Amino acid sequence: MSEIHGWAAHAAGAELSAYKYKVEELPPNEVEVKITHCGVCYSDVHLIDNDWGISKYPFIPGHEIVGKITAVGSGVQDRKVGDRVGIGWQADSCGICEWCRKGDEHLCAKAQPTCVGRNGGYAGSIRVNARFAVPVPEVLESENVAPLLCGGITVYSPLRNWLARPSSRVGVVGIGGLGHMGVQFAHAFGSEVTAFSTSADKAEEAKSLGAHHFVNTRDTGALKKVAGSFDLILSTVSADQDFQGFIGALRPKGTLVVLGASPSPIQISAFSLLAGQKAVAGSPTGSPSDLHEMLDIAARHGIKAITESFAMKDCNQAIAKVKKNQVRYRAVLKN
Ligand code: NAP
Ligand code: ZN
C-alpha cells in the first residue's frame, strides 16, 4: 500500500488544500503515471463549485494530464515504464458495450471520468486504465500538449464530425482554453474562421492563431451583422449566452455545437431552427482513438496550447485567475 499526494476541495467552492489518499496493488489493466503537468479546464471549476450537482468531496480536480508511466498492471501489454503519456477527461470505460466495441468509448454509459468518482490530476500521480493513457508524440512539449487532452479534443471532434472543410465558414465562440485551440484546429481544416469574443484585447492574437475575422460580441448588434453566415459554430462559453443570436448567425443547414457546460437550460425558438433546417448539437471530448489522431495532427500542424504555468502548490491562484477570465489561454500546473 502507498499514498498519492494531491490538492482537494473539501466543500463546494472551497479553496484546495493538501490531501492524500491510499492506493492498493495496481489493478491488472491500469498504469500509474507520475504527473509532470496538468491543465486547469473550466470543467474543474464547475466541479469544484458543484455547478453540475454531481461533485463529491474531498475532490481532487484535474483531467488534462501529462506524465511518465511509473508502473504497469500485470495485464498491460502496450505501455511500459518510462513512456510519456497524456490522460484526458476519461480514465476508463466498460470495454464491451456497443460503443466501446465501435471505438466510441467516450459514449460508453459506464465511462469513468478521470476526476469524477476518481481522484484527478492536481496531484503527484494518478492511475487509469492503460487504454486511456495515450502516447504523446515526441515533438510536442508536455506543457503545451496537456490542454489538448481535454480542451483540444473537445474542439477537434466536432470539426471532424461535422466535416469542417475549406468551403466551410466556422465560428468559434469564447476564445479561452477550448476556443483558442478551436481556432487553430479550424484553421488547420482549411475553413474560414471567425472568433467570437467578449474580450476586445484578444483580437490580434485570435488572428495570429488563424482566425480570419474577429467579432466582439459586446458590440451592439454584432450577431445581427453576421446573420446567416456560418455552416458550423462551436460554442465554448462556460456561462449563459445569446444562443438564439448564434442560431441566427447560421446559414441554412448550419449547426451550432454546444461545448460549454453552463448548467442553465438553453432557450431557442423552434421556428428559428425549422426555417433554415438548422441544428443544435452537443459534443463530449473524444475516444482514445480520437486522441491519438488529434495529437498526431497537432504535431504535424504545429498546434499547441498557449499556456501560463503555475506550480502545483499554487493551484488556487490558477483557479482564481481562470474564474476571472484572465488566463491567456490555459493555466497549466507543474510538479
Ligand atoms: P475558459 O478557458 O474559461 O474559456 C471560456 C471563454 O468563454 C472565456 O475565455 C471567455 O472568452 C468566454 N466567457 C467566459 N465567461 C463568459 C460570459 N459570462 N459571457 C460570454 N463569454 C464568456 O473555459 P474552458 O476551459 O475553455 O471551458 C469552457 C466551457 O467548456 C466550460 O463550461 C467547460 O466546462 C466546458 N467543457 C466542455 C467539454 C465537453 O466535453 N463538451 C470539455 C471541456 C470543457 P472571451 O474572453 O473570448 O469572451
Ligand atoms: Zn476539461
Image: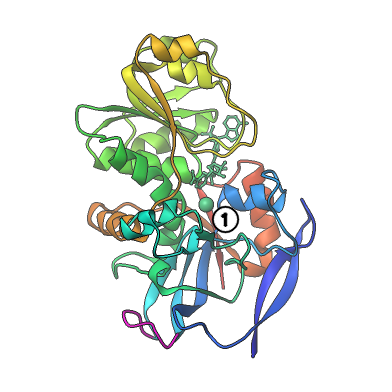
> What percent of the width, then of the height, locates residue 231?
31, 24
> What percent of the width, then of the height, locates residue 333?
57, 64
The quadrant in which the N terminus is found is: bottom right
Q: Residue at x 58, y 47 (%)?
A: 42
Magenta region, residue range: 73-80
Is 164 positioned to the left or the right of 18 in the image?
left
Label 1, secondary structure: give it.
loop
Q: Quadrant of ligand 1?
A: top right
User: Label 1 amino acid?
Assistant: Val
Q: Residue furthest bottom?
A: 1
> What percent of the width, then of the height, locates residue 176?
51, 41
Q: Residue furthest front?
A: 97
* Crowd class of label 1 (few under 14; some 14 to 19; many from 20; radius 10 Å): many
The quadrant in which the C terminus is found is: bottom right
Q: Residue at x 39, y 23 (%)?
A: 279
> What percent of the width, then of the height, locates residue 306?
44, 51
Q: Is 76 a magenta residue?
A: yes
Question: Which of 203 and 282 lies nearest the eye of the viewer?
Answer: 282
Mark 1 vs ligand 1: CB below 8 Å:
yes
Question: Which of 291 and 224 lies nearest the eye of the viewer?
Answer: 291
Is 324 positioned to the left or the right of 73 in the image?
right
Compared to residue 95, the image places residue 44 above or below, namely above
Residue, disc 1 = 40
- Magenta span: predominant SS is loop
Is 292 positioned to the left or the right of 23 in the image?
left
Q: Is 323 a magenta residue?
A: no
Q: Residue furthest left?
A: 166
- Residue 291, quarter of picture: bottom left
How many numbered callouts?
Answer: 1
